[in-house]
Image (cartoon, coloured by chain):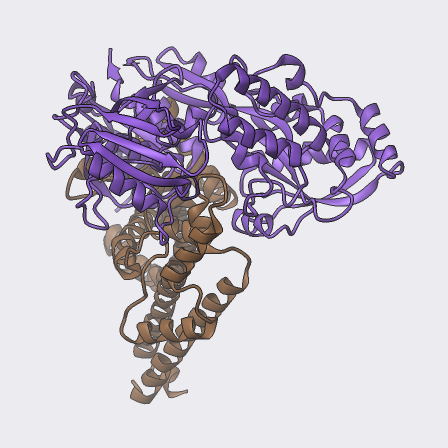
Amino acid sequence: MTISRRTVLGAGLAAPLLTTGLLSRPALAQRANGIIRYGLSAFPPNLQPWVSTGASAGTVKMLINRSLVGYGPNGELRGELAESWSIDGDGAWVFKLRQGCLFHNGEPVTAEDVKWSIEQIAGEKSTAYMRAQFQGVERIEIPDPRTIRLVTKQPEATLPTWFGNYNTFIIWRKSAANEPIGAGPFRLTGQERGTSLDLVAFDKFYKPGFPKLKGIKFIVYADENLRNAALVSGDVDMIEYVPWQSMAAVEADPRLKLDSVEGPFMDVLFNGTKPPFNDPRVRRAVAHAIKRDDIVKAAFFGRGKSLEGLPIVEGTPWYDNELAHGWNYDPARAKALLAEAGFANGFQTTLLATAQFGMHKDTAEVVQQHLAAVGIQCELQLPDWSTRVSRGSRGQYDMAIHGVSADNNDPDGLTVVLDTTLSPSHGRSFKVDAPRTIAALAKGRAEFDQAKRVAIYKDMQRAALEEVPLVGLAWRSQGYGMDKGVKGFTNLPGALTTSSGCMLEETFFG
Amino acid sequence: MNAAWLAHRVATALVLAWIVATIVFLALHMVPGDPAELLLSTGGISPDPASVAELREKLGLDRPILVQYGAFLSGLLRADLGNSLVDDYPVLSEIALRLPRTLELIFAGTLLAIVVGVPAGVYAALHRGGTFDKVASGVTALLLAVPVFVVGTLLVLIFAQTLRLMPAGGFAPLTQDPVLHLKLLTLPAIAIGKGLAAVLFRMTRAAMLDALANDYVRTARAKGLAPGRVLFVHVLRNALNPVITVLGLHMGTLLGGTVLVEYVFNWPGLSTPLLRAVEGRDYPMVVGIVLTISVLFLLINLIVEFLHATLDPRVSAS
């Protein structure tokens, strides 16, 4: 038998025809059914309502659970399970529950459930993200079944924002330990471990007409390029964390749109327990030595903005243009500050980051170059993320690069990165002395008058510019990419961008 | 076959598996990184140290390392690999869920490599020096040279992003959506099978050329046998022996190659939890998966040795 070239070519040409059915694009049946396909960046490690397991898990948790308050499209705090809240004459916070709120098992949401949930978060054996804050609640009173009164150990002006965090949900108090029952707009109906999660609309959700979608299929794409490819190819209707390098292509695609905001930021942290970074003049020299535009270009493909002060969101009452540029790029001033601190000839040091995330490594490389220009020679240390975290919280570094979001857009949300008297963390400087900054943060937290709070936080910014508990580097853009037919979704402003998942209850196909 | 020889080989494999498990267990505990701290800092900022301490106690990480190792060995003897530190999911269940997907990917890639590589090798040998032979030889060099993640990314770019013919990646259970399952399997199978296809093409071509030059082939033709019978009965049968040996040797390589392919195509096999577990210092998960992969390697080696011993008694006798 002779196998001819024609036979081989014929077989090759026939193969696609035989597999036409296999290769054809599926009908958009899910969209017609009101089910959105959402490309998630990570499979939730778990869906425990009070433990921090990342923003992707937070997106899912926000949809199956609810808290007393949440955020609206403009980042304003709005009532969820609570219809109103106020401070009473004795300085206690009083929340009034909305009528008709039901958990997914049909049980009504009561003040007892709220009390129980707070007690679980603040409990001695708790591993909740907001445990420290809620341990500041001295007692919880229930004057009537729809009212909760929280008496705090100290005045807490920002207490309602605690309930806006996506690790603070109200759970039915008789839930089994591993099966928390929430009151969110969607119910979890299935999951393929590590791959996908299926949510369907909760028909007894307390907001009439919401959610607008009939369901959400979360499909996990850990690789950012594949996640973007899934959006471009139409495998999903929407993705989170559009890679910076792909944002222009998404904007240019006539079928797609991009919704991005500048929320998370990059910063430099210091070890304040030893020279030279125990001297604020040296830290200020670092702040003035770095040309931030280069970071935005190199690490974020131009999708970000220089950050020459504390990460206060522009457009909020706390923002001050002059203070926002207090650490402007000025290498001559950096050199003068180094000379003043006794390092006229510079010095050698180390810069800790991680090679596991490109934005950390790229930022570190730019910082290294600019510091070298003023005489600070940095040896880059780029271990894996786990080691970076471990070394950061143990103070085993001189300088470190970090990327994070504040808890919310109130300056008090920056406490978590600025208050160096809190327990050591990989996300804030190690034992850097910044007493005036920290005192101002505490003062702002205890002040209820808005005008006074604005003045206090401007003082706080002035103090931080001198004490330098961190050096802001760059805001980074955080984008959601979606089909143009997806309507009603809003990327929340500033630090709240990671809470934007709650907007999926208002999303629909138009 | 010598029973003592077989028993010795099995015992050696078991000891090797134990050594691998021990090394991985100890090495993981020695590198920096606290699973409890990592787990609670997923949101970006380190958690309250009291919370970390609570979690460490709950997970049993506060016990001395030798006590933890003893508990691990004790569990191993009861076929219990422990639970994930992240979500308390049994490691054995995770492996039972993921391993078939990895094996399916390897099987599909191998099948594709055989279907493409062997016939192409035969055709190239039969038409030695022809256009197909020259082009195919060049293509195989390219397939061997280009890394698997580059091929994977190109496949996604061309077939998913540009032509929109195939899904970019992911997984759908065969029982729920067989068509989508096969679609999702196609590109990763091509990516993982491309190197093996090139190897099989070259081996088949070379073995065929050797076989075609033998006297018995000329004799068979001289006897007036049909060309097809000469090809399949006299040439191919003899030429396939070295091809099968190479195929066996490369199966282990494919197991390693799945790590990148599964990542590029979001195929939820063993690689995804392994990478995630290493990043998160999820000790039981890492040890369990590495142990499984090691046992698979040892099993393949054992089977190969067993086959050699069966086919050639001198192997076990020596």
Q: Residue furthest left?
A: A106
Residue under the image location 84 percent in, 37 percent down? A341
Residue A71 lies in quadrant: top left
Q: Is residue A52 above or below residue A324?
A: below
Query: Taking the image as drawn, is residue A233 in sight?
Result: no
Residue under the image location 33 percent in, 30 percent down? A39
Chain rendered brown: B
Question: Front-most of A75 and B111?
Answer: A75
Percent coordinates x, y for residue B184 in the rendering: 28, 37
Percent coordinates x, y for residue B13 in the rendering: 38, 76
Residue A344 lies in quadrant: top right
Chain rendered purple: A
Q: Residue furthest front?
A: A90
Percent coordinates x, y for residue A352 in the rendering: 65, 44
Q: Is residue B120 above or below residue B313?
A: above
Residue under the image location 45 percent in, 67 percent down? B25
Position of residue A26 in the picture relative to residue B116 (left or right): left
Quadrant occupied by the C terminus of chain B: bottom left
Position of residue A29 in the picture relative to residue A467 (left or right): left
Percent coordinates x, y for residue A136 in the rendering: 42, 40
Q: Is residue A139 above or below residue B216?
A: above
Query: Taking the image as drawn, is residue B77 in sight?
Result: yes
Residue A218 lies in quadrant: top left
